[in-house]
Amino acid sequence: MKVSPAKENILKRVRNALSQPVQLPFPNAEGNNPVFETKHDGLEMKFAEEFSKLQGKFIFCSSRDELAENLQALVENKEWTHVHCKTPSLEKILEPYKPAYLNVGDMYTLDAAITDCECLVARTGTLVLSAAQPSGRALPVFAPVHIVIAYTHQLVFDLKDGIAKVKDKYQGQLPSMISFATGPSRTADIEKTLVVGVHGPKEVYVFLLDE
């Protein structure tokens, strides 16, 4: 089969190009580097900023005394009478302050729930929760108001760091459920109108304890 001069000319240029490879014009676009910058000073500030954008309420506490005082002030301001907590480590922290509002009824009469979390994701203002926590699956979703008490050492930058932290904690035996809560529950399924608190808590508070 005779090849036309024009086609032969094209093939010749292709062969010459293949014999002389050149560097990629955008080497960093091939997935060699992470999309987001992973080094970030002040994860507390980053989390507070992103969490607040999502209508979350952030309170930084430098001590257990300050944590108890801030919780008491919140309860009094909201006129709550029953705040439920099923996390022994958090009950132990609050026990010396003898809060009258804590666990005075069952979970069906609660005003708010206090739980811990697996970690906090600073970049997105996300809470990472799991079924392995003492609060279980239902409490963080059932409560009209969700209060999370977390520690500064639980802060991570990105979601992948949070997943790695959970994997490391449970030695590869992951909990049956891991959930990512980013602000109060919300939906815009009905007539594209944003409604808060439909499928979960309408308010979410994070008390970050620096210990």
Image (tube, rainbow, N blue to C red):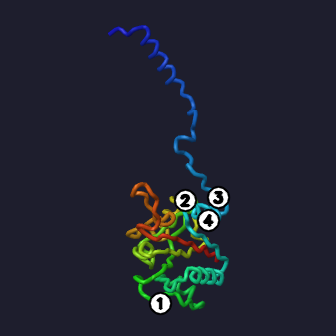
Q: Distance from label 1 to label 3 (Cα)?
A: 42 Å
Closest to the observer: 167 or 187? Answer: 187
Bin the neighbour count of mark 2 within 10 Å (Cα to Cα): few under 14, some 14-19, many 20 and up.
Answer: many
Question: Which residue was labeled with disc 3?
Answer: 40
Among numbered discs 1 and 3, the one appearing first in the sequence: 3
Closest to the observer: 33 or 49? Answer: 49
The residue mark sitting in front, 2 or 3, is 2
Query: Residue 161: percent from the left, percent from the top?
Result: 53, 61
> Identity of the amino acid at label 1?
Val
Question: For the point 56% across and 33% down, which residue is it?
Answer: 24
Is mark 1 in CB contact (under 8 Å) with mark 4? no
Dot 2: element: loop
Among numbered discs 1 and 4, the one appearing first in the sequence: 4
Question: Which residue was labeled with disc 2?
Answer: 124
Q: Distance from label 2 to label 3 (Cα)?
A: 13 Å
Residue 104: image tag = 1
191 on left or right of 146:
left
